[in-house]
Structures are given as structure tokens and as C-alpha cells.
Image (tube, coloured by chain):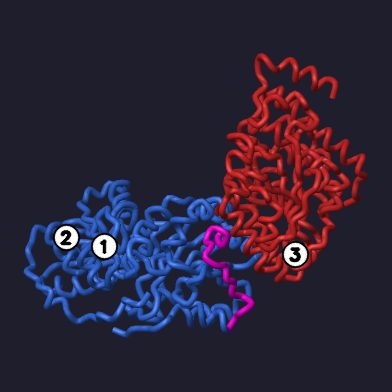
Amino acid sequence: MNIELNTHSKNIIQWAQTHPEFVVMSADLGSSCEVKEFSKCYPDRYFSMGIAEQNMVSWAAGLSREGYRPFLHTFGVFLYRRVLDQIEMSVAYPNLPVTFVGFLPGIMTPGGVSHQATNDVAVLRSIPNMTIFDIGDATEIESVIKLTYDVNGPTFIRMLRKEVPRLFPANEPMLFNRARTLTEGSDITLISSSICTEEAMRATAVLREKGLSIRHLHVSTLKPFTDPAIPEAIASSRYGCVTIENHVTIGGLGSAVADVIAEKGLGKRLIKVGIQDTYCHGASKMYLLKKYGLDAMALIAAIEDLTGQKFKIGEQELEAIRFEDYSAV
Amino acid sequence: MSRKTPEQIQNAADAIRKRILGLAIERGGCYLGQACSSAELVASLYLGVLNLGPSLGSMLAQPFPGVPSPDNMDYPKGSLYHGAPEPDKDRFFVSPAHYASVIYCALVEAGRLSPQATERFNVDGMNMEMIGAEHSPGFECTAGSLGQTVSIAAGTAHAYKMKGYSGKIYVMLSDGEIQEGQAWEAFQASSFYGLDNLIIYVDVNDQQVEGWTKDVMNLEPLDQRLEAFGCKAVRIDGHNIGELIEAAGTEHDGKPLVVLCHTDSAHGIPLLEKSKPFLHFVRIEGGNAEAFEQFYRQM
């Protein structure tokens, strides 16, 4: 598996060449959000707004009304909690094309509770006109800017930074409101998003060897959530569905799937793997994945529950994958 | 747009006040104190300061056109009443949406809305709500949640600067909403970006919902605070048409201009005097109705 470096930084610099209306706004975390190089290439299109997110959001609304395409950069946690009213009244109500690029989704920061965006999807999914993307790999980082232009309204991106794996072929960009089928199978449907997809891929590789037939879907559009492949997969799964997300299990991917199961009358069981109605604390990614039950082992336990089978898988079987340093702030 | 004489503007301000008192009597109440404090301010902007193109809005009230959505972006906007956006024309953002009735009545005086339209003010299903949104005549943005419009207008002014437009961005603020932290973020950033195309008129009527502003959360010395944040600030008599017009010409090179208009929320309707400082929403019912009706007849 290839690890790509600073993909967002390269991508926006390239995008800006042919899109003069594309501008970057930063709330003093630009260098932590891959816009430092952009500010050197396009100093006139990089707006330092200081540690003042509320003004930044409404100011962006003013710019977008004049035809600019503002992309707001800071940690995701500061782009939904303290600016919720500004998002709703300045941007979402008028359906303006403003993009919130929220870095460090879920447990992707050692910065602790104040820096962890763990219920952003739940909050943002309730906002009319809002579209939410949850990035899973480098290919998706490269494809998402175009999708925000296609949407032409408010968009929130749960963005990944620095070293990001390329899980999906570079020539297969993410599609709007379309899940990616990673494996075909009929025993269970496994639906994953964000960094949890990598964990899910580790788990499915081992489980398939044990004879379990898994339909694994990776989801990168969390709102809207109307891809017909989702109910179709769940309806045809023998045991039901497991979701895994880098977010609390209330209001995020798992809840969106639950709505689909209920509204379509699929009558299948669902197990939601994710952060269980708690805040988290500051530590390394690997520690947090394990502590809060977002890792491959937690997923396997959920699948054992769903299927009523024991697969006797130890951590050593799940090795393979990378464990690089995520401790940088 | 032809500028009106101070006398004509005063007549328009008087007419705004009278029309809103009429609505308040008819409907049992209205944001009447705000009409009294801001009638000259708003009339001066529309008739003596703003450089707007001819209105593109309907002269009559319209059915509510629906909320903005991907399928509904071409609905008639409140900004149509300020004319087509042109590089050399001004824009006018109203922040305190509670002043909607004042804006509607000022549009009537500016010939941009029919007098009949105000009969549909705050009627269910119509676009001229008591607190509207950006579909309401005269509203460039959705402003009811206080403190956000100055940032939106500043973003617009920033865009005008980058595009080299000569039109100015005017904002009307109320004093109470300057208590919002975001307003100060906006002043700070407007100064940082040198937005000398941004002109903010503040209705300083010294009152808010819970009483005198100085008792709820003191803002003074507002001019010094604004200057410390990098704005040019001037204080004027907000009922003096000459001062209101002249203030827009204050030199403010490289800085946003804030015009602090000191006003009286009983101005022109002394009957309101005894209700100060609780004039956020004036109810006219039972006991006080006759006095207001009598006053209205002799206005």
C-alpha cells in the first residue's frame, strides 16, 4: 500500500491554477492544515482570518455571494461547534457554495477532547442544504474538490492530512453519493468510512480466509445518503449489517444506515461500531483506535456478535498494515 | 438615483414613523421604538446617501417564495429592491432584522415598494414578515441572528476591493448587537484588510430588550473602542438629516467607517417616553390604544 504525503496541499495548488475564484481562508492553523504551500503560491488568494472562526464563516458567505469559492481551513472541531449558528444562518440557509475543510476528524489528533471532532457528522447531518464528505484515502482527497464544485452549495469535508494511504486506484475517483464496493459477499454487509475503512480492510482480509462472505462498502458521502447500493446490499445479507466509523455512533454513518434499514423495512440487524456516547482523551491514533473500539479487533468482535460465530483471530493475524507516527500536532 | 433634499427626507422619515404606528395600531403592536429611532437614519440612507440602481423588485407584496435550496435558488431576492449589483453601485446590508417594518416603509418612501404592499406586512404566507430573511424586500442576507451581517458585508466589501469595484458597502447595525463577540471579530478583520469601502451606520438608541444598554452590558465609550479596533468612528445626531448625510463623506482612508447615530426611541411619538427603556416590542391594546389612535390622527 502506498502512503501519499500532503496530497491536499498539492491538489489545491493544482486546482487553483484553473480556478481563479478558488480562495483559501485560514484561522491560524494553516500550517497544520496543508495550506502553507498554497499561501506561498497564491498569496493574494490566501486570507488569514486569525483565531476568529465565527467572523471567518460569515465573511466567507460575503465572498461567495460575489462569486468566490472560499475553502475554510482549520481543525474540524472548530468548524462546527463554535460556528454552528454562522454555518446555519450565513451559509446553509442561503445555500452558498462555501466549503469547510475540517482536519483531524474523530480521533485523528492526540490533542484530546478540545481538538477531536467526534460528533460533527451528527450535528451537520441535521442542517438543510449541507453536504458532508468523509475522506478515506489519498485518491478521495484528490477527487473531493471537484465534487464540492458539482454540489455548488455548502459542503463539509472531514479531511485527512500528511501521510495518507492510497487505498483506492488513483484513476477511480470518489463519486458523489455512491459507495465504493471493496469486496462482494452475502453473509454480512460491512459499511465503513474515514480511517476505519483501512481497519475494516484488515479485518475482512482475515475473515474471508475464515470463510465469511462479506460485502464491504466504503462510504465517503455521508449526506445525502440515498445510494441504492446500501439497502440492496443489506437486504441480501444473511446476517445483517455492521457499520464502523470514526465518530460517535449516534447521528453518524451507523445512524444513517439505521434510517435506511427502518425506512426500507429491511428487517435486518445492525451493529454500530464507533465511539460509544463518550468524549475521548488525548493519545496516539493506535491507542485511541483500540481504547474506543474503532479498530479491526473491535470490528471482528461485532461481526462475531452479528453472525453468532467465533473466528478465533488474534492481533498477530491482523499485522501487515502500517503504523506510522500520528503524534505530530 | 436623484438625491432628495433634507426637507424631503425629513418628510419621508415622518411618513415611515406614521405608517408603522398605523400598522402597530392595526395589528396590536410592532417594533415601534426602532421605527422612531431609525426613521431618519434609514430615510437618509435610501434617499440621500446610497447610490443604488432602479429597483428590480415587485411593487407589491408577494407570496413567500420558499426557502433557498438546490431546487430553489432563483426565487425573488430582497436585494432586488436595491437594484442590479453593478461595480459602481452601492450595496446596503441591514443587520437588525427586527427593523424590517422600517425597511419596508423606507422602500415605500423611496418609490421601490407600493404603499399597498405594507397592508400585507406580517400576513401569513407573505414575503414581508415581521422578521424576514433574504427573500424579504430590502434584505441582502438573512440577518435575524445578530452580529453576523457585519461579517457578511465585510466579506462582500473585501470582494469589491479585490475586483476593483468602486461601489461602497453600507451596513445598518443596532447598538445592542455590538455586544456579540463576532461583531468585534468583524471590526478587527475589516481594519486588518483596510476595508475603506465599508460604511457602517449604527442606531445607538441606548436600549435593548432588558433595558438600558449601559445596564444590560455597557458598550461605551463606543467610539474609542471602535477606534482602538482600527475603525474610524464618528458620533452624530441620528435624527439630523444633514449630519446623517454628511457623515458618509467622513474621511476614512484605509479604514472602515462607523457612524454612531445617537437616537431616541420615542422621537416623533412622545407617548412612548413613559415605556422607556422597555421598547423592544410595543404592544398597543386596550388601555393605551385610544391615546395612540388619537396621536396617529393628528400626525
In this picture, is B289 found above or below A17?
Answer: above
Question: Which quarter of the picture shows residue A33?
Answer: bottom left
Give residue A113's position: percent from left, percent from top: 33, 61
**Chain name for mark 1:** A
Secondary element at tag 3: loop
Please tell me whether residue A18 belongs to the stretch shown in magenta: no
In space, the residues marked 1 and 3 are separated at their CA atoms by 51 Å
Q: Is residue B107 visible?
A: yes
Visual hue assigned to chain A: blue
Disc 2 marks a residue whose amino acid type is Ala
Q: Are marks 1 and 2 on the same chain?
A: yes
Q: Which chain is red?
A: B
Q: Residues within 10 Å of mark 2 (few under 14, many from 20)?
A: many
Give residue B128's position: percent from left, percent from top: 67, 37
Q: Which residues are magenta?
A: A41-57
Which residue is pictured at 72% across the width and 26% down the height? B272
The answer to whether the residue labelled 1 contacts the one labelled 2, judged by CB atoms less than 8 Å apart, is yes
In the displayed structure, does residue A103 sit left or right of residue B12? left
Question: Which quarter of the picture shows residue A309?
Answer: bottom left
Name the one closer to the observer, A96 or A57: A57
Q: Which residue is mark 1?
A: A244
Q: Which residue is mark 3?
A: B196
Question: Which quarter of the picture shows residue A245?
Answer: bottom left
